[in-house]
Amino acid sequence: MSRVVVLGAGIAGHTAVAYLRRWLGRDDTVTVISPRPDYNWVPSNIWVGVGLMKPDKVTFPLAPIYERKGIEFVQAAATQLHPEGDAQDSTPYVVAASDDGKVHRVPYDFLINATGPALRFDKTEGLGPEGHSLSVCLPDHAAEASRALDEEVERMKRGERRKFLVGVGHGTCTCEGAAFEYIVNLEFELRHRGVRDKADITWITNEYELGDFGMGGMQLKHGGYVTPSSIFNASLFAERGIDWITRAHVEKVEPDRVQYETLDGAKAEQEFDFAMLLPPFSGVGLTAVDAHGADITDKVFAPNGFMRVDADYSGKPYEEWKASDWPRTYQSPVYPNLFAAGIAFAPPHAISVPRKSPNGTVIAPAPPRTGMPSATIAKAVAASVTDMVRGGEGPTHTASMAEMGASCVASAGANPFTGTAAAMTVFPIVPDWDEYPETGRDIKRTFGEIGLAGHWIKILLHHMFLYKARLRPGWRLIPE
């Protein structure tokens, strides 16, 4: 009998758990440790944030599903790993704390860290729901954004002109895609509610150019032509009357304006009445301790709190970065029974070109690892763990972001007749300049289109992935 523990029940954690329970024997235990009682289909938080859905349409309770499937569920936040056990018992275990103060000691034979990110609103003064801006990172955040939007619409209906600011709230953010999806949905909703003429909408981003999305931009095949994603994005914004500020690091969010620095070192400010600014990410703060009680956090985790895996962390200069630097198995180089999946693994470096202002401020997107890549990685890790439980040697499955493609359908307005969505595919996610020297990617498999059909696909994906996440009959037939 083996004990497999998964930390986190988001897209990566929940995917890993589902496959582990299906593939492992009934004598093997699968345990999930997660601080939240609900699963959240995060991509649809965008629609909650503009009032098109309620939080209960993008969440569901985990406990009944896990009980039905024979999965142990511990609602608690993991705080500390003991990969060597302790002086009395060499069995590895994880420590987790519940909201009621109860401390759990959960032993494991294999552990998958899928804790996702900590939302670091604290990195920018005044950022976030506790400060002066809004968010759609969590369902309750999105619901608050929807309420604030309703108030702004009422003001505009009374004749007031209002200023909307949407984007990212720090120079190192990695959530440009979600903010992009929100701003175009916001613009569409203001048109739908008949108040667009009273709204000034501005995009603020740490991207060097529009359409970077933390992936260094893309060369998209569109309408028979190859178009840079910067042009694709700029055209979409121009058509909708959205202004933009690029190469920006938000230093401070005040009640009615942001103070920001640009890549050339200049300081500026942008006024707003409504600001939805997403935060930078870090690891959740897990620590690690060896059998003698010594802190080994630096061995297991990178300085940003994400877990070290089979990647090249040597810190080589940008000109020497390779696709092969990226992890393939997500196994810890220190403890072979320890894996990471989804956002929880530490990238070896950014994908976009690293840049600093003359003041030393980093203003460049961090690499995205959400959605489809998270689920694909989690499935591969679950398969490797399953094989190792059965006596196999080492990880048997790989899922390098430099060897996989990804599809994204970004809503640009939700309406069954006039809505649109941008459907994009990219292959590979991490550019491979050795294999594709002209663009870093396979242009035949990297393309984008926008239209009503994309909106219907987005709706279909919302229902399909919630069906899959509920582990209903045939769930495994729906791809990651």
Image (cartoon, grey):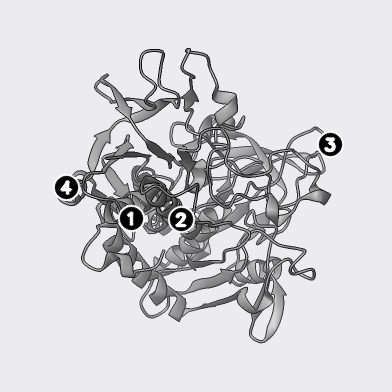
Q: Earlier in the sequence, mark 4 or mark 2?
A: 4
Secondary structure found at label 1: helix
* Above or below 180: residue 464: below
Disc 3 packing (10 Å; few <14; some 14–19; many ≥20): few
Please state which amino acid type lies under the numbered disc 4. Answer: Pro
Alpha carbon of mark 1 to alpha carbon of mark 2: how far? 10 Å
Residue that badge 1 annotates? 19
Disc 2 packing (10 Å; few <14; some 14–19; many ≥20): many
- Say whether residue 146 is visible: no
- From the viewer's perspective, is the residue at label 4 or at label 2 nearer? 2
Provide residue 251's location: percent of width, then percent of height. 65, 34
Secondary structure found at label 4: helix
- For the C terminus, the quadrant is bottom left
Residue that badge 4 annotates? 64
Provide residue 397's location: percent of width, then percent of height. 49, 56
- From the viewer's perspective, is the residue at label 4 or at label 1 nearer? 1
Residue that badge 3 annotates? 358
Alpha carbon of mark 4 to alpha carbon of mark 1: how far? 17 Å
Identify which residue, 416 or 342, lies in the foreground: 342
- From the viewer's perspective, is the residue at label 3 or at label 4 nearer? 4
Residue that badge 2 annotates? 380
Provide residue 336's location: percent of width, then percent of height. 50, 38
On residue 115, the disc is none
Q: Residue at x 77, y 44 (%)?
A: 355
On the picture, is 393 further left or further right than 239? left
Q: Earlier in the sequence, mark 4 or mark 1?
A: 1
Secondary structure found at label 2: helix
Q: Earlier in the sequence, mark 3 or mark 1?
A: 1
Alpha carbon of mark 3 to alpha carbon of mark 1: how far? 48 Å
Provide residue 332's location: percent of width, then percent of height. 54, 38
